[in-house]
């Protein structure tokens, strides 16, 4: 489980899928949640704003009706006949006619204002006049609650509310829930004494007509309550929701409450004129239903995005990871030893470039293996030839040693000296099978060779061997100077007219051992010198086996360069490069008619330990 928590241990396919899902699906999910939250807030704000605007219009209509009733109270109290009735200045003779005129006047108002159910005018003595309303017998109207409330308001228009418990009845016999009563006390302008009260009943069907067509959503509706919390209007076909006036603070707002009908949202506006509060009632389940519809579309959108994102991420990750997996399988085959496998693809992206680099790498490895096998084969052949060469010098060395003792015993000192030099030459050449010998032994070997050549060429060959002090025990590859000197004798001194000289010097320069062989022989022209240098430059170059074989055959056949001249130099040069690296080897300088100089650059190796255990083979 912990391994799966390490992202670096995931397969690249899973990483790509996770990456695509994060950049594709996660933003879609976040966008869906953001849209859901934003739409919820926006719908709530829009619903509240629209409902408040609608309630404001309804309130203005209700205030219009209330203002009309207020105007009616002013009109009624300002009528001369009504005025005389209220202040008691009407005479007995005019009393009957005045009251008839008052009733006719009130009837006219009821005709003009159809929302008026009845108008009742009561004076301070309890007498009343009305077009539709009349007091019940045995009850004094000045003791009615509505009358006392109007008196307390000192002439201010008052909405009394439903006519419950009053002792006033109507010819039409409206129910209490069908009308709303308003009242205003009429005051004497001079003494501010209450002269009476004008009572008006408003038909609630007017309010119902105003509100019945108002619908808030599917199940929302409007209701009106007074300042006591009593319902002024509630739709007849919908259940009433119990509300408290304490819920509605301020002039407008929105709130949520848990009621018997469930969780309800209330949006309200309070009229400062009427004191009524118009309330928009929204069951929360309705808004939840609408939000669920929006949620359905959002979830559907997110689902489709996720489906597309998963499919696309799987496809894209497969197109990227599949060739990588194939390349890994090819690498495993190559790792197991199958170097002939190849990554085959027409892709031109980074994976295709990596595959082609992989193919080139396998090709180069195959070339290197083939080259190494060829060089190992050459090395084994050289070792075999060296073994054969060592076998012959052992026999020759023992034979020459016998000849030397026989020559000395018979007084042939010259022959004995040549035999001794040749024996020493073979002895140092064997060197117990070692590849490196002290520089002193290499010079001893060279001097033995020159003594033999001196006997042959006599005064035609002169030589000088010089070594910088302290270098005698530095170790060098054996038999590196003799082939160079031999080349100088046969191709330099021999071709020269008159005697010639070979100079061999050993010194250290810039931390490297320099061995220089210089002759004043025939030298080489520029063409022949270029051939020799080119042959040396090709030594150690990374050639295909076919090229190496072709060059070997050319060298064996002599090629354009004399193989007797170049073979010894190339052999020494190749041994130095193979043993110590490309910076070491031979350099040649030559001028026709002046001579040739061969410089050997050899590492200045630490002095070898003394070795006095050389074994001389006796016959």
Image (cartoon, rainbow, N blue to C red):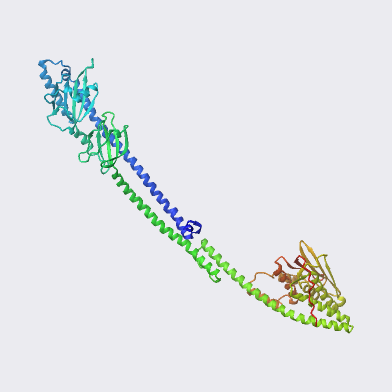
Q: Position of residue 616 (x, y in %)?
A: 80, 78
Instruction: Quadrant for residue 187, please give it.
Output: top left
530 and 34: which is toward the camera: 34
284 above or below 392? Answer: above
**In the drawing, does residue 598 fall left or right of residue 40?**
right
Q: Tell me if residue 495 can be seen.
A: no
Picture residue at 83% right of the left edge, 83% below the top: 403
Relative to 17, say whether 53 is above or below: above
The answer to whether residue 550 is above or below residue 145 is below
- Give the residue drawn at x 81%, y 79%: 423
Figure disc tally: 0
Considering every residue shown, the one lying at the far right of the view is 411
Looking at the figure, which quarter contains the C terminus? bottom right
Q: Nearer the viewer, residue 187 or 336?
A: 336
The residue at the point 19 percent across, 33 percent down is: 204
Give the x, y percent position of residue 152.
24, 22
Residue 354: x, y in percent?
54, 63
User: Toward the viewer: 593 or 206?
Assistant: 206
């Amino acid at each position: 489980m912990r391994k799966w928590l390490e992202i670096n241990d995931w397969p690249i396919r899973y990483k790509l899928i996770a990456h695509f899902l994060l950049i594709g699906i996660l933003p879609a999910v976040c966008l869906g949640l953001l849209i859901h939250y934003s739409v919820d807030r926006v719908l709530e704000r829009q619903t509240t704003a629209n409902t408040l605007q609608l309630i404001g219009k309804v309130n203005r209509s209700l205030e219009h009706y209330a203002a009309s009733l207020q105007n009616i109270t002013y009109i009624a109290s300002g009528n001369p006949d009504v005025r005389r009735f209220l202040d008691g200045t009407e005479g007995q003779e005019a009393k009957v006619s005045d009251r008839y005129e008052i009733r006719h006047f009130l009837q006219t108002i009821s005709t003009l204002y159809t929302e008026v159910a009845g108008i009742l005018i009561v004076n301070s003595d309890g007498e009343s006049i009305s077009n539709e309303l009349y007091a019940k017998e045995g009850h004094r109207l000045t003791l009615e609650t509505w009358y006392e409330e109007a008196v307390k308001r000192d002439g201010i228009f008052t909405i009394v509310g439903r006519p419950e418990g009053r002792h006033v009845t109507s010819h039409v016999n409206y129910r209490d829930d069908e009308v709303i009563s308003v009242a205003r006390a009429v005051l004497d302008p001079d003494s501010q004494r209450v002269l009476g009260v004008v009572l008006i009943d408003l038909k609630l069907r007017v309010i119902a007509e105003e509100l019945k067509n108002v619908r808030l959503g599917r199940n929302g509706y409007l209701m009106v309550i007074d300042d006591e919390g009593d319902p002024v209007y509630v739709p007849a076909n919908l259940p009433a929701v119990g509300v408290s006036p304490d819920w509605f603070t301020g002039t407008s707002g929105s709130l949520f409450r848990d009621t018997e009908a469930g969780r309800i949202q209330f949006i309200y506006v309070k009229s400062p004129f009427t004191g009524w509060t118009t309330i928009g009632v929204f069951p929360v389940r309705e808004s939840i239903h609408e939000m669920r519809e929006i949620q359905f579309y959002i979830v559907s959108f997110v689902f489709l995005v996720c489906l597309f994102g998963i499919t696309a991420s799987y496809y894209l990750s497969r197109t990227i990871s599949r060739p990588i997996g194939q390349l890994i399988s090819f690498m495993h085959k190559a790792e197991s030893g199958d170097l002939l496998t190849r990554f085959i693809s027409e892709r031109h992206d980074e994976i295709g470039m990596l595959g082609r680099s992989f193919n080139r790498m396998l090709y180069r490895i195959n070339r290197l293996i083939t080259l190494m096998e060829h060089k190992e084969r050459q090395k084994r052949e050289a070792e075999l030839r060296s073994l054969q060469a060592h076998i012959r010098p052992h026999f020759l060395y023992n034979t020459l040693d016998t000849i030397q003792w026989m020559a000395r015993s018979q007084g042939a000192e010259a022959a004995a000296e040549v035999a001794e030099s040749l024996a020493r030459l073979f002895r140092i050449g064997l060197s117990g099978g070692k590849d490196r010998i002290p520089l002193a032994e290499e010079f001893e070997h060279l001097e033995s060779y020159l003594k033999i050549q001196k006997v042959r060429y006599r005064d035609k060959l002169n030589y000088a061997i010089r070594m910088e002090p302290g270098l005698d025990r530095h170790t060098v590859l054996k038999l590196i100077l003799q082939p160079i000197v031999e080349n100088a004798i046969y191709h330099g001194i021999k071709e020269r007219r008159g005697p010639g000289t070979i100079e061999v010097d050993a010194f250290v320069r810039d931390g490297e051992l320099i061995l220089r062989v210089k002759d004043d022989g025939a030298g080489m022209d520029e063409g022949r010198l270029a051939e020799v240098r080119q042959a040396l430059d090709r030594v150690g170059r990374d050639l295909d086996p076919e090229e190496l074989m072709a060059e070997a055959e050319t060298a064996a056949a002599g090629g354009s360069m004399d193989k007797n001249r170049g073979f010894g130099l190339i052999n020494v040069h190749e041994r130095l490069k193979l043993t110590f690296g490309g910076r070491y080897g031979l350099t040649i300088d030559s001028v026709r008619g002046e001579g040739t100089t061969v410089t050997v650059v050899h590492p200045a190796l630490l002095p070898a330990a003394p070795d006095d255990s050389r074994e001389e083979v006796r016959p």
